[in-house]
């Protein structure tokens, strides 16, 4: 008799733990005072019927204040997707664009080597810097450029309008080799 009670108690504890772990993994909503089930269903883009069935409720009156409603799986998947943010070298990726990219150097006829952002490229020829349209990418923004790396948006240019950038390189030869091409960029934060 004692053994049966012990086995029953252990089985009950295991089932309770498993049930609670499933609830913790699932998306839930705790019903607040004055909330109606139809409002909750609308908020989570589901139906009252789905909430009743999922929570094994006979009618809407059972979902009173304090009741923890299990929500459909698609709610959990949306939450997980929203929580997963793309990162790159400890920066959060804010957006991704495809742009036309060319290259420039500080050593051309008429080039001062000073950027619109106030950086002296001749003093720091190893800097990763791009020229941008500040209406598209504000000056000072960190940007990852395909085939170039992480750079700062530190200059503007007469022909740099819209989704166009210029990448800074050390020499004319490197600039000519870069050419003009479509690249993916990621705006970082």
Image (cartoon, helix red, strand yellow):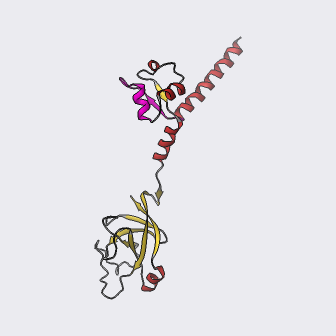
The answer to whether 67 appears left or right of 25 in the picture is: left
Q: At x 51% / y 21%, what residue is drawn?
A: 57
Q: Quadrant of residue 8?
A: top right
> On the rendered image, what quadrant is the N terminus found in?
top right
- Vertical side of 83 occupied by 92: above or below: below
Residue 14: x percent and y percent?
63, 26
> On the rendered image, what quadrant is the C terminus found in?
bottom left
Q: At x 31% / y 74%, what residue is drawn?
A: 119
The answer to whether 109 appears left or right of 87 in the picture is: left
Q: Quadrant of residue 127?
A: bottom left
For the record, the magenta segment spans 25-44
Relative depth, front residue between 55 and 187:
55
Residue 166: x percent and y percent?
39, 75
The answer to whether 176 appears left or right of 159 in the picture is: right
| Residue 14 inside the magenta-drawn segment | no
Q: At x 49% / y 28%, what residue is drawn?
A: 51
Relative depth, front residue between 182 and 127:
182
Residue 41: x percent and y percent?
44, 31
């Amino acid at each position: 008799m004692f053994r049966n009670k012990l086995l029953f108690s252990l089985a009950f504890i295991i089932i309770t733990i498993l049930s609670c772990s499933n609830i913790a993994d699932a998306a839930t909503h705790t019903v607040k005072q004055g909330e109606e089930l139809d409002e909750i269903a609308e908020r989570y883009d589901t139906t009252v019927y789905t909430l009743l069935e999922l929570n094994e409720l006979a009618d809407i009156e059972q979902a009173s204040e304090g009741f923890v409603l299990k929500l459909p799986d698609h709610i959990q998947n949306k939450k997980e997707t929203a929580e997963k943010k793309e990162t790159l070298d400890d920066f959060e990726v804010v957006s991704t664009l495809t742009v036309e990219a060319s290259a420039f150097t500080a050593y051309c006829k008429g080039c001062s080597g000073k950027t619109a952002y106030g950086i002296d490229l001749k003093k720091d020829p190893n800097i990763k810097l791009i020229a941008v349209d500040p209406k598209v990418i504000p000056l000072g923004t960190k940007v990852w450029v395909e085939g170039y790396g992480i750079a700062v948006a530190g200059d503007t240019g007469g022909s740099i309008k819209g989704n166009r950038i210029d990448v800074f390189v050390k020499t004319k030869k490197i600039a000519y080799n870069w050419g003009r091409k479509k690249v993916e960029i990621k705006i970082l934060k």
